[in-house]
Amino acid sequence: MKAVYMDFQKISLKLAEIFEDLKTPIQTTLLYNGRTTPHPILRDREKIIKGINITGLNFRRLNKIKHEKRVLAVDASLKTLFDCGSFKIIIGKVAGIIWKGRRRYFEKEHEIRAKLVRTKLETLEFLFEIELSTAYKMSKRIGEEDYCILDRPLIAVPAYRERTIRVMKNFCRAMAEKKIRVVGISKTSKLEINTGESLLGYLYSKGEKLMKNKSWYYHPLFKLSQYPKWYLGDVTIVKFSSDSKHVFRVDVNRRDPEIINNLKEVLGEIAYLDDPSIPGYPYPPRCCHEEAKISKQELETLRLTFLEEMKKFKLKERLILNTKSSNFREEELWR
Amino acid sequence: MEINDNVGVVLWIEGDEVTFRIYKDKRVHRGQLLKIIDQNIKFIIKVTDFKPETLLSPAEISRISFKIEKGESIDIMDEELRCYYTATGKIICQIDDYGYITGPTTIPKIFSNVKYITPKDLEEIRLETGDIKIGYLRSGHKATGSTISINGEKAFPHHVLVCSITGGGKTNFGKVLAWNIMKEKGKYSMLIIDTESEYFDGGDKEHLGLVHSIHSEKGLVYITPRVKFPCKIQYEFRFGSERITRNIQAYPLEIWWGTLQPEDFEQTGEYTPPQEALLWMMWRRHRENWLKYLIERDANLIYNELRGKIQKTTILVTKRKILKTIGEEIIFKSEECKTRLINEVLKAISEGKVILIDMPTSSESQEKLVTVLFARRIFKFYERCRKIFPKKWEKLPTTLIMVEEAHRYLSKQALYQGGVKRENIFAIISKRGRKYRVGVCCITQMPGELDEPLIRQQLTKIILPLPTKPDYQLLINYSPYLDDSGTEMKTLDKGEAIIISPPSGIKFAVPAKIFKYENVIIDELANEVYIREEQVEKE
């Protein structure tokens, strides 16, 4: 136990460096450029992109704007149907619902898809594809100035296959052409500032001082030209409600200049969609998140259905043996 | 009542309990009857309870309610999806294609529609087929257009229990019952002992009495200290601009000591075993004059006569008690009376009338004695008739004896003395009266005090407002069909009731609004005046 306490001490010192760094006097160059002024950074493989210095002037007041626009929200969830060690059979369920203002307007039956995957990246791509596919199909029911909210940042991760990246880019382009406002809201973010502190955490603490008891958004973080190609969205950090204790990363479609120019209106209209039960996060993506969940009963039914299918190919026993090979840990060690 | 309107959808069924979602714009009341139709079977359910259902977590509910507390306006998205109300109902019966009613033997499907009940449905349940009309079917706190009636012929011999707190509507119900009996013209008879002078003319300006009914002239016999000899009392009153007169047969309330028997005193429950023994000894020695002898004779002489078999103190206490009850000679006379009141009462009972004994100034012990006296005579009369003159007995009307404050006679305390059960006439009638078509209508504010077997024997129950738990819990424990009615009993308003009457075919707890007697009589009087005017016009 003594070793772990020593580890905790080392971590504390490291954190102190991160958090306290900003308290040291600003050092300037001969040209009076602040070198330790906090700014967001983006990592593009080995390259580090420095964003715009963080200043109080870029904290902007956010007001809810009432509207009756159609809002499409899409979310998907995954569960493992069978874990065979070297591969998995996974199930994805997608929920897509359209609201008109604050009223539920249209929903289609939640689609369930399955895939055999070997890597984590394949799993993420699968999730990505089924979400975008549903979003694209349902976007036919919405139009100009309506919204499409995704529960993810608008980035086409370079690690994805080319096909997947193309799908995302095409999607954003198509939505921009239709003038549908695509917005990606992330509940978590790896964005950081130059000291290593989380960007969201830093802005939240700053916001609490400058914009106490108010809803706000922070923009811009980067110049549009600074974003790498695989960044399809322009990043803002938003606190949707004065009651909320959370801030979110909100990406808006970079290919849609109209959205960037009307950012206040866009974010204000999204803020209007929050629910008193959980203030500070728009209800449509939250609702889709809940509806996309796969229950135990559903999973069991799908398992049995799949096994029936395997029977036809006389592969059922083989599959079961493969799953047993990976279940030792659960069955024997973690009992 | 809405016709063919959907109220909700079935969510779950367990046993005979149905849980259904109430649609957003619909309202459902506790005790309300609804229906579910599934595959040609109609299930009638009675709403027993409510419960909100929500997908919101406790933390979210807390947050929202706090905002409301702060005065903020709240707009919950997907509110109907995330918050809705459910009700539970009990399946009370099922009706098949042929209209055959049975208890529930199957269940409706989940997601079946729950609908409002229609007048046609009510006809199928047969709540109106009896001849004693007592009220309206109630939906929540509202009376519907459908009436509820019980079958007197079948219900009365199996006895009636009426329970309510003070001011709950017991007297009103008693008047409605009596009015029905008068209306049936000889089919039934009833004995009422009125110590508050409420039954004859209502007692005050706001209330009406039995005399106001058109049926009183032929259906009512009035026994009162107001008259000194048998006669017809002329009672006048105004209805609007019309003057109406009723001529009611009346008898003086006078009972000769000689007609009283030891058993009459014994069954009031006010005498100890040694005192009762003394009464019987006196009776055996002196027959009709036993009471006069006991009262007028010196205690020492009685003691000597009985050769010390009864203690002197017992004799003294017994004399004092009896004197207290009958000594003033207001009701009970030492000399033989010109009117043989007991005979007149039995005659009126045989003719199918309501006999109203009005004794407003009597003491509790006098009231008890009069009640026991007449109850015993009536029961003995029917018993003897059936055993000796069966053909005559068959022609007698079914009779009902109203017992106010029934817990004084039928409580565990009254029936058990020193651990030994001592039945009185009401307990005997409760057990055996059915065979002779003599029933008791027990009225009480404290059903919790009643002996449990007696509650079981009173098959027709009229439960008016009864909020005290020991009282309604005992009724629930010892009655069928009342399992889920506890909450409803607590929340009844004055005049609202829950009725069960298996002998009448009412095999579930029916929510009712008892007729307001005054409204019934006003309608009757309006009709009477109208007919009178028509007749005058014709002439």
Image (cartoon, rainbow, N blue to C red):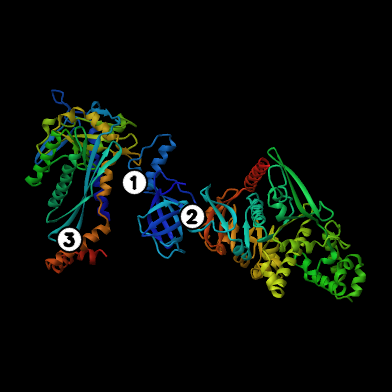
Q: Are marks 3 and 2 in contact (CB under 8 Å)?
A: no
* Image height of A311 relative to B119, above or below: below
Question: Residue beneath label 2, please?
Answer: B122
Q: Mark 1 or mark 2, which is nearer the start of the sequence?
A: 1
Q: Is residue B144 left or right of residue B213?
A: left
Task: Classify residue A143 by image quadrant.
Answer: top left
Residue B525 in sight here: yes
Q: Which residue is drawn at 80% across and 61% down?
A: B341
**Kind of residue at badge 1:** Leu
Expressed as whole percent of the image width and height from the top left, the position of residue A226 reads 11, 32
Q: In this view, does A220 lie to the left or right of B477?
A: left
Disc on res. B527: none
Q: How crowded is mark 3: few (under 14 residues within 10 Å), some or many (20 or more)?
A: many
Q: Residues within 10 Å of mark 2 (few under 14, many from 20)?
A: some
Task: Classify residue A274 by image quadrant.
Answer: top left
Q: Is residue A100 left or right of residue B112?
A: left
Question: Residue beneath label 3, please?
Answer: A83
* Image height of A88 relative to A27, above or below: below
Question: Residue beneath label 1, please?
Answer: B81
Chain letter behind tag 3: A
Chain letter behind tag 1: B
**Kind of residue at badge 3:** Asp
**Kind of residue at badge 2:** Leu
Q: Distance between the residues labelled 1 and 3?
A: 35 Å
In the picture, the quarter occupied by the C terminus of chain B is top right
Chain letter behind tag 2: B
**Dot 2 and dot 1 within a common chain:** yes
Name the mark nearer the viewer: 2 or 1.
2
The front one of A246 and B424 is: B424
